[in-house]
Amino acid sequence: MKTDKIVFNLRDSVGYIILNNPLKMNCMGFDLLNELNQAIDRIRTDSTVKVLVFQGAGDRAFSTGADLKEFNSLSESGLKNWIVLGNELFNKIQMLNRPTIAFINGYALGGGMELALTCDFRIGTKKAVLGSPELEHGWLPGWGGITRLKQLVGEVNAKEIVMLNKKLNAEESLKLGLLNRIDNENTDELNFFTNHLKKLKPEIFELAKVALQDHSRTTSGADIQFDVLATLFSRNI
């Protein structure tokens, strides 16, 4: 499957979605968002894809976020559609019923970092740089980035990243928990993750993902019942 802004490849049960706008550092406009949305809808029902990896084309960026020229030209209704579409798409990716990995080779800024935050895992090369420059452009991270960032690294660190436009290199991102691993140029860490994750039963992974993403989860009541039902379910698949 190949379109103007998205390239999809499937190798050994691992799907690779490549943001294909390298001349503009894989920035995202409506065309890319819509194509990505369509790709996710197809993958949700494609059982041959056991793990999904997001990458940016070229060697400079995962994605530098919004296409600023397009964004700045939006009408009020267009701006609303932009924010709603991005949130609906990124929520869909976060809740996808199989493992997702952002492989970050270069800049992941603004909406690019917001996309990476929707994934279950983030692996960066030594060239990875993560940041949230939206306030300096005069708006807020609008695709769920503030909430996901705060949940991941805490309010104190999130304030520095968002309010001070603090850009983090690979080592800083790893220390803070924004990255799970730093990969070498041979993608050893990425291969380790994909080889492990594609062996998991997708139904069990989905249940674990739901539990881990429930920020109100406790160790009593309905949550115990969830664990009981999940364990009984796992015996019968």
Image (cartoon, grey):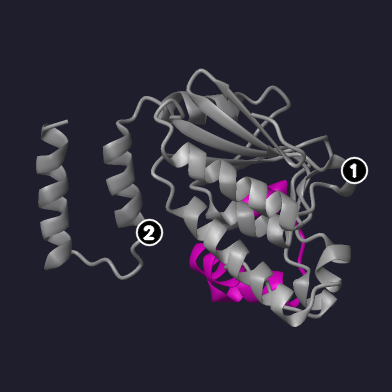
Say which residue appears at 78% left-offset and 44% top-offset.
106
Q: Which residue position holds label 1?
A: 23
Q: Residue at x 60, y 57 (%)?
A: 176
Give the magenta-colored segment's residue range.
145-174
At 81% from the left edge and 80% from the top edge, which residue is drawn? 138
Can the viewer see residue 29 in this picture? yes
Q: Are marks 1 and 2 in contact (CB under 8 Å)?
A: no
- The picture places residue 213, in percent across and down from the top left corner, at 38, 59
Name the amino acid, label 1. Leu
9 versus 102 height, above or below: above
**Residue 110 lies in what quarter of the image?**
bottom right
* Residue 142 seen by the camera: no
The C terminus lies in quadrant? top left
Q: Is residue 206 above or below residue 195?
A: below
Residue 67 rendering spot, x and y as whole percentages: 82, 60
Q: Residues within 10 Å of mark 1 (few under 14, many from 20)?
A: few
Which part of the image, by quadrant, shows the N terminus? top right
User: Residue 200 vs residue 222: left or right?
Assistant: right
Q: Which mark is residue 213?
A: 2
